[in-house]
Each structure stands twice: as C-alpha cells, then as structure tokens.
Image: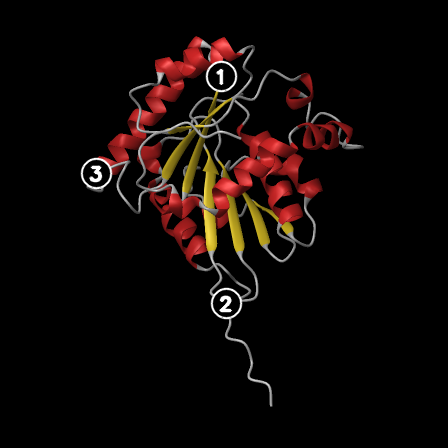
C-alpha cells in the first residue's frame, strides 16, 4: 500500500498597494499583480481586497474576477466611519488559506487618504508597495506616508528594518526618464525602503479601466508589463527573504 505524501504547508502571503495620495497607480498595479498571480500560480487562491468603503476600485475590478481570482469589498472590513476595521481585516488574513490544498495571496488596494495611524493591520502584511511619481505633490505625500508608517511601527516598538516587519517597496511610476527615477531615489535616499525599477509614463496605464465593454487596454497593459508583473509576483512569493534586510535597489 502506497504511503500518502505528507501535506505541504500552505502559505498566505499578503501585500498592500498604499499611499495617501490618489492617482499614483495603486489600483492598476494591484489589479495587474492579481492577474499575474492568478496566471502564474494556477492552484493558488488570489484575492484583491478593496479597502475603499465607497467601492471605487472594486466596481471597476469586479469584471476581472474568475474562479481563481476574487474581488472583495465587504462591509465587515470597515467601521461605521469608513476607516478600516483592523480586527476584522486581521481575522480575514488569519482565516487563510481557506483551502488547505492552495497557497493564498491577499492583495490589498488602499484608497486615497488612508492613514497608517488608523491601519494597524499593516503590521501583518509581508510587503507594503508604495507607488509614487516624482511630482512635488506625490513626493510630499509619499514622504509623509512613510513618516506615518514609522510612527505606527514606533508605537508597536518595531523598527521598519526589524526581522518580521513588513518590507516597504517604493514603486516609481509615471517616470519620464531615468533621470527622474534617479532624482526620486535621491529625494528618498534616507528612507529605510527598497526601490523597484521605474515604470515609465504610459497612456495605456492611465486608461486601463476606461473601456468596460472590452478590456483591450488591460490586455495590452498586461502584455507590455509582463516582465514587471513577474518581478512583483516573485517579490511577493519570496517576501520573507526581504524582511529585515537593508535598503537596496531591486533589478528586474
């Protein structure tokens, strides 16, 4: 009689696309990441969790859901004020994987105006992706958001570079040139973060959700971004290796 193989330990990996500033590409990057994960890991469960109580993103993203990729925007994830319900979000994270035969990926899409001070569940994420452009408004908001993250960690007696802490990855978006990317890295040089390679300005990226009758823009964006999305999904898959490391540049 053949001895059954022991069950493989399944993992839940969590990542959030977050910045207090709107219009930096959080929702588009979250969608691309989920589609990339669902395509790359056929037996995995992928959830895109929209943390906007107004369902701004999930209304647009729901049409991409399939048997391996779901879009979540449940009332129990929010307080009456519209702020995240940290306890219920942590419970949702802890309830994964629901299917012991599948790895799980939970990808959070944070709305504009979100503040780490009201989002202690961030401490339970493996990765915090912070998209930003190099515009003055975006850089100012990004620096303020990173400071708020430090304040959150300080209140929990945790350091951003501490083992077990989420790794923070800056995603330079809507860059016009390599010079702009270098400028952004210089501005944020003192931040304890990782840096991704730049995404350059693309009208396809900006129009990804405009056509709801057919998804030509999204399909074209996926083709144009395959290498970048594979890099992000690999980062999520190996997120435990990043935590606690010193800031460095990640090459594609």
**Viewer-nearest of discs 3 and 2:** 2
Residue 8's label in the rendered image is: 2
User: Is residue 183 toward the left or the right of residue 215 in the image?
Assistant: left
- Which sits earlier in the primary sequence, circle 3 or circle 2? 2
Q: Is residue 207 above or below residue 115?
A: above
Quarter where residue 176 is shown:
top right
- Give how far across and how far down residue 72 sits, in percent: 57, 47
Question: CB atoms at circles 1 and 3 under 8 Å apart?
Answer: no
- Which sits earlier in the primary sequence, circle 2 or circle 1? 2
- Give how far across and how far down residue 40 sits, in percent: 63, 47
User: Is residue 120 toward the left or the right of residue 52 in the image?
Assistant: left
Can residue 85 be seen? no
Quarter where residue 137 is shown:
top left
Residue 171's label in the rendered image is: none
Q: How many labels does the image show?
A: 3
Classify mark 1: helix, strand or loop.
loop
User: Is residue 120 toward the left or the right of residue 92 in the image?
Assistant: left
- Give how far across and how far down residue 33 sits, in percent: 58, 38
* Residue that badge 3 annotates: 155
- Give how far across and how far down residue 58 sits, in percent: 61, 38
């Amino acid at each position: 009689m053949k001895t059954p193989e022991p069950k493989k330990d399944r993992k839940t990996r969590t990542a959030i696309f977050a910045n207090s500033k709107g219009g930096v590409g959080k929702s588009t990057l979250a969608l691309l990441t989920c589609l990339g994960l669902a395509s790359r890991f056929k037996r995995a469960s992928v959830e895109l969790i929209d943390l906007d109580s107004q369902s701004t993103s999930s209304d647009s993203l729901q049409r991409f859901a399939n048997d391996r990729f779901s879009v979540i925007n449940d009332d129990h994830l929010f307080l009456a004020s519209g702020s995240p319900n940290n306890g219920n979000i942590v419970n949702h994270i802890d309830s994964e994987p629901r299917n012991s035969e599948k790895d799980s990926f939970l990808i959070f899409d944070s709305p504009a105006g979100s503040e780490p001070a009201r989002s202690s569940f961030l401490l339970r994420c493996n990765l915090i992706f912070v998209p930003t452009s190099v515009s003055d408004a975006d850089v100012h908001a990004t620096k303020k958001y990173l400071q708020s993250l430090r304040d959150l960690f300080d209140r929990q007696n945790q350091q951003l570079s501490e083992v077990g802490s989420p790794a923070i990855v800056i995603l330079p978006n809507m860059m016009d040139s390599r010079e702009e990317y270098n400028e952004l890295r210089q501005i944020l040089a003192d931040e304890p973060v990782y840096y991704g390679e730049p995404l350059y300005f693309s009208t396809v990226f900006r129009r990804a959700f405009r056509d709801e009758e057919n998804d030509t823009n999204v399909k074209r964006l996926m083709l144009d971004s395959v290498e970048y999305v594979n890099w992000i999904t690999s980062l999520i898959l190996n997120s435990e290796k990043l935590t606690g490391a010193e800031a460095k540049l990640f090459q594609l």
